[in-house]
Image: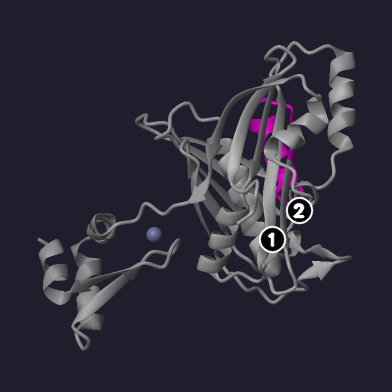
Amino acid sequence: MFLNDNYLVRATAFDGRVRALAVDSTSAVRELAQLQGTGPAATAALGRVATGTLLLGATLKKETHLVTVQVKGDGPGGTVLASANGRGEVRGLVGNPRPAIQETIDGKLNVSGVVGTRGRITVIKDLGLKEPYNSTVELVSGEIGKDFAYYFARSEQQPSAVGLGVFVDRFGEVVAAGGYIIQILGGLDADAVETLEREIAGLPHPTTMIRAGESPEDVLERVFGKTFNVLDRSPVRFHCPCSRDRAERALILLGPGEIDAIIATQSHQGHSDVTCEFCGTNYRFTLDQLTALTN
Ligand code: ZN
């Protein structure tokens, strides 16, 4: 167990003109990587998207609100996707968890080699309203942190500094994952902006700080000194809300024709399995149960 593992800090600074979020997501990302069976660079891609999504989730007003970030690039990893709610629960997946790529370049995990450098990042916020909020911007780097920053600037008109990182050891195991988002909410004078930018530019990589045993508060202290106010600290963890009920509803949504087709192809083994792509849980339906869903 890591000392500072797995919680998120929400804070403000400069009399509420700056919002600052920092998270250690090591255990959650380790579990995501194990469930998805990702290679090292895909682990980093998934972990960065998941960590950014957790940070975005912490900006939601209610615990039940949900944010999904979908990164669709032209790389061999396919779509990288994560969902987080306001309770700090996250799940995620990678289209191709073990793409044939060079895993590291100059000692760094080749995240843009997995994701690609052209494509889109889509943020879907389910705020309990009739329609979810939905916004898409172009990818600018495929390294994820810059892509989140660009999303905030373009879609939310929110100048933001975003740092996201995942460190894996030589066995491919996640040793550290975490990140931060620092946003200017408005009304900050040019000198303060300059100071802030300088401090953020001087920050070590997120996983360097985590591996050195620094907590999310320590990361914020590097930027703001003692002049930030912690609003709250909340645990973050992997959690998949799938259930047999949801699997059943997904089948019903396919429609009777599709279900009949499943019954026809699975009749030799007498059942069909619905497997959750996020956590791998298997839900088995007998042919009789499937037939019942068509009525
Ligand atoms: Zn699941």
Asked if 23 appears above or below 183 in the picture, the reply is below
Q: Residues within 10 Å of mark 1 (few under 14, many from 20)?
A: some
Residue indicated by mark 2: 211
Q: Is residue 244 left or right of residue 76?
A: left
Q: Is residue 264 left or right of residue 278?
A: left
Q: How is the image coloured?
A: one colour
- Indicate if the residue with disc 1 has its beta carbon within 8 Å of ligand 1: no
Q: Is residue 159 magenta?
A: yes
Question: Which is more toward the observer, 152 or 214?
Answer: 214
For mark 2, give the secondary structure.
Answer: helix
Secondary structure beneath dot 1 equals: strand
Residue 39 sits in quarter:
bottom right
The residue positioned 80% from the left and 51% from the top of the image is 208
Establish if 21 lies above or below 32: above
Q: Return the mark for residue 128.
A: none
Amino acid type at circle 1 is Val
Q: Quadrant of the N terminus?
A: bottom right
Q: Which image quarter has ligand 1?
A: bottom left
- The magenta span reads 140-162
| Distance between the alpha carbons at the discs numbered 1 and 2 | 8 Å
Residue 227 among magenta residues: no
Q: Quick check: 289 left or right of 203?
A: left
Residue at numbered disc 1: 175
Q: Residue at x 36, y 67 (%)?
A: 281
- The residue closer to the viewer here, 255 or 276, is 276
C-beta proximity under 8 Å, tags 1 and 2: yes
Residue projecting furthest to the bottom:
268
Q: Position of residue 162 (x, y in %)?
A: 73, 38
Whether residue 73 appears in this view of the structure is: no
Q: Position of residue 165 (x, y in %)?
A: 72, 51
